[in-house]
Image (tube, rainbow, N blue to C red):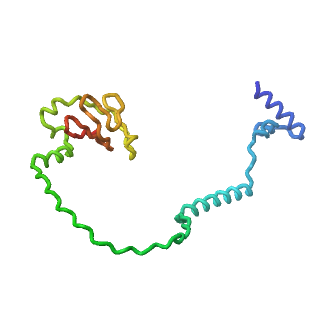
Amino acid sequence: MSYILDALRRADAERERGAVPGLHARPAPSNADAARAPAAIGPGTWVLAIAVVLAVLVAVSWQWLTPETPRVAVAPAAPPAAPPAVPVAPPRATAPAALDPIPAPRPAVSAATAKEPAAAERIYTIAELPEEIRRQLPTITVGGSMYSDDAARRMLIINGQLYHEHDQLAPGVTLEQIKLKAAILKFQGYRYTINF
């Protein structure tokens, strides 16, 4: 139905112009078609768009290729030191001090006593601990960790609970230190490490 109406409109438009439309005649554009037609972009618009793109590219490449100058912080000049208010007298010659008495000899250190601090400082792996100590160790499962340069902010999730350094994890087990991928625990005088 709309084809017929369009054909009739075309015929009326052609009659008004003085010519009879043929089969291959193009329809006359209506006002709605003219409003929908895209506006042609003129050469001036293209030149302006290319100029803007080139300006942006030049600015970006200039900033990218220009080396950044280092910023130097200038410390404020210190005020000159004030001269002393009172002149200082030269030191007087004093009599030589009495000689210190001969120090008492130190008690001899036995080999067993010398080994105790070294053993306390040694950090074992779980496999290096004595068999009886390993049997007594509680089960410790690490669920997560957070490491920081500030020791107060380091945290470790063990058996579902959150702990900080020097907290007691289980009876007799102390969390001594949290490292990036390991922790140092203490149990019955033995320091040992667990990795996570």
Q: Depth check: give the residue in front, 84 or 46.
A: 84
- Residue 73 placement, left or right of 48: left
Q: Position of residue 14 (x, y in %)?
A: 86, 38
- The answer to whether any part of residue 6 appears in the image is yes
Of 168 and 37, nearer the camera is 168
Q: Quadrant of the N terminus?
A: top right
Farthest residue to the top: give it.
1
Query: Which quadrant would the C terminus be assigned to in this image?
Result: top left
- Give the residue furthest to the front: 95
Location of residue 151 by image quarter: top left
Q: Is residue 46 above or below residue 77?
A: above
Query: Which residue is found at the position 80% from the left and 31% from the top?
Result: 7
Instruction: Say which of 88 and 68 sits in front.
Output: 88
Place of residue 152 in the rendered image (x, y in percent of width and height, measured from the top left)? 39, 41
**From where the camera sits, is residue 68 visible?**
no
Give the vertical position of 74 relative to 30 (above or below): below
Residue 137: where, in percent of width, then height?
Answer: 20, 31
Q: Is residue 109 left or right of residue 171?
A: left
Q: Position of residue 37 (x, y in %)?
A: 75, 42
> Which of the 4 image quarters holds residue 13?
top right
Q: How many marks overall?
A: 0
Q: Residue at x 31, y 43 (%)?
A: 179
- Closest to the observer: 31 or 189? 189
Q: Quadrant of residue 146?
A: top left
Q: Residue at x 37, y 40 (%)?
A: 154
Give left or right: position of 9 versus 180.
Answer: right
